[in-house]
Amino acid sequence: MPLLSPQPPTPPGPPSPTPPPPTLPPLRKKTTSISLDEIVISKQTVNHQNKPPEKSNSDLKKLGEISTLVRPQPPRTNPFIWCSSILCLLFSLILIFFGIATLIIFLVVKPRNPSFDIPNANLSVIYFDSPEYFNGDYTFLANFSNPNRKIDVRLENLVIELFFSERLIATQAVQPFTQRRGETRLELVHFLSSLVFLPQNLAVELQKQVQSNRVSYSVRGKYKVKATLGLIHYSYWLHSRCRVEMTSPPTGVLVARNCKTKR
């Protein structure tokens, strides 16, 4: 068998180019379907993870004690203010009590004012010393009556005045006296005018009334009344006014009167 001769080594030539790497197809994102339950669960899980840790009961108690210590205490009320408030309350209650008691008494007792009247009068003298100065003598009977059935009264500081056409011509004081319930008292009041000045127009008017046999006077009374009902005492002022008409002197008599009494 013939022997093969060894091939001579091939001389090294230039290196052959490296083939490019194979191009891979683009990767597609793999989508997976997720159910709604999984989404809800995942959100709850996330919320649970983000939720801050709860504080223990001991921490809460410590915070409460700190807030209690830090809270400012209200200022204490001055004892003087308490005493003043109590006194004002007691005073208000006393006023209310007395007001109700007074109202009940007035509704039960029904107090009435004493009355003043002139049942009789006499005009004896009117004459002029000069055209503006005249003299007069006038007497009337004053009737004071107490119409109350449960109240006694006392009349004090009693002053009665005589006017002609709003001009004061005489005045007279009456002594104080006491009237029992339902009692009537008559007082004789005497007015004496001596050289009383009258303006010319009033003097002429008085002379005309004397000639016409009808003379008009005004009687005014002012007095203080003290009423007594058991242990209750109270006082007030009364004003009485009477308009009287009389015949001419010397036998002047009362022909008309109108009396009113008010506080």
Image: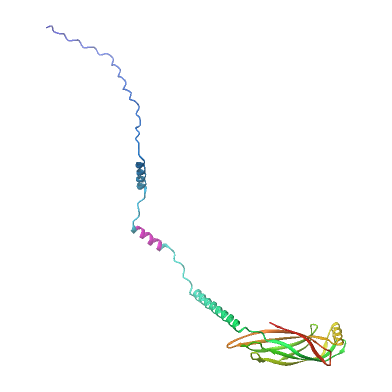
- For the question of whether residue 160 can be seen, the reply is yes
Question: Considering depth in this image, is 238 or 19 the residue closer to the camera?
Answer: 238
Q: Quadrant of residue 105?
A: bottom right
Which contiguous range is marked in magenta?
59-68
Question: Considering depth in this image, is 79 or 60 the residue closer to the camera?
Answer: 60
Q: How many marks?
A: 0
Question: Considering depth in this image, is 3 or 147 the residue closer to the camera?
Answer: 147
197 sits left or right of 48 in the view: right
> In the image, is residue 232 above or below residue 42?
below
- For the question of whether residue 176 can be seen, the reply is no
Q: Position of residue 1 (x, y in %)?
A: 11, 7
Name of the residue lying farthest toward the left = 1
Name of the residue lying farthest toward the top = 2
Q: Position of residue 163 (x, y in %)?
A: 78, 85
Q: Quadrant of the C terminus?
A: bottom right
Residue at point 69%, 84% (across, down): 238
Q: Quadrant of residue 220?
A: bottom right
> In the image, is residue 86 above or below residue 259?
above
Q: Is residue 34 magenta?
A: no
